[in-house]
Image: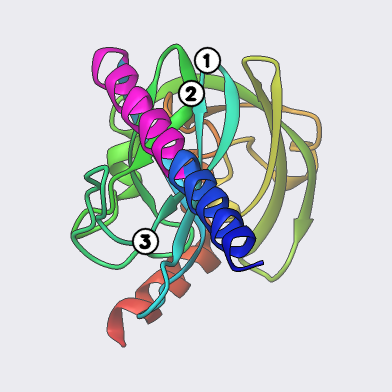
Amino acid sequence: MERLKDKKGLIILSLLCCVLIIGFYNTWKDEISLKYNREVTIGRVTDFRYRTRSGGFIKFEFYAKGKLFEARDPDDSSWPKLVRESRAQKFKFYPVEYDATNPDNSKIKITKKPLEVRTLLKNGIKIKGKVENAYSVSESYVDLYINYTYRQRKFRFRTRIHKDRLPCGHMDICKQKEIELIISKDFPDVNNLYYLSYDRIAMKKAKEKK
């Protein structure tokens, strides 16, 4: 009976060792592939959890070949080496490296500071958007609901603009009118009019004062 227990324990230990070896081998193989097929883009943190004893995680999304990918990294800089210069900030942008042959093989670089929106739009692409609706929210401001299509993917957002600066002219003629937008080529969710929204600018200023 004692020998049988020892044999079972040895089998379990052998299986665990095999699992670890396979895991390390697959990670090593992914690292080699990433090294030789590396592409750099921009990703957005969607969630994270930091833990002191057991490992946490950082969830992020990025675009590659016109498709949106969702990924997950450990929160620390364990092997394989990861860039973790500060704590991640939710919904902020950071550089992402991915394997051109397999974009699911990716890493997010958590730099000291997240990337600014103006950096994403610096070499932006000009495209046409369409105003779906326009609503007056005060004597001075109008909410525009806008959609646009990029690489067969449709995007929709809301922005609050002063009535004297509407990109479509007077509010009464805005509906269904085409307007010009600047979007990020790396992260097409990001466009100039979204961040020019009066309420979002006010919220950003309030956070910076804290």
x and y percent of residue 137 in the render?
73, 67
State if disc 2 and disc 1 touch (CB < 8 Å).
Answer: yes
x and y percent of residue 206 in the render?
39, 81
Q: Nearer the viewer, mark 1 or mark 3?
A: 3
**Quadrant (top left, top right, bottom left, bottom right) of the C terminus:** bottom left
Identify which residue is drawn at 57% across, 18% down: 66
Q: Nearer the viewer, residue 204 or 159?
A: 204
**Quadrant (top left, top right, bottom left, bottom right) of the N terminus:** bottom right
SS state under label 2: strand
The magenta span reads 20-37
Query: On the image, numbered disc 1 is attached to which residue?
Result: 65
- Which is more N-terminal, label 3 or label 1? 1
Q: Nearer the viewer, residue 183 or 74?
A: 74
Q: Amino acid at mark 3?
A: Asp
Q: Nearer the viewer, mark 1 or mark 2?
A: 2
Residue 108 on the magenta span: no
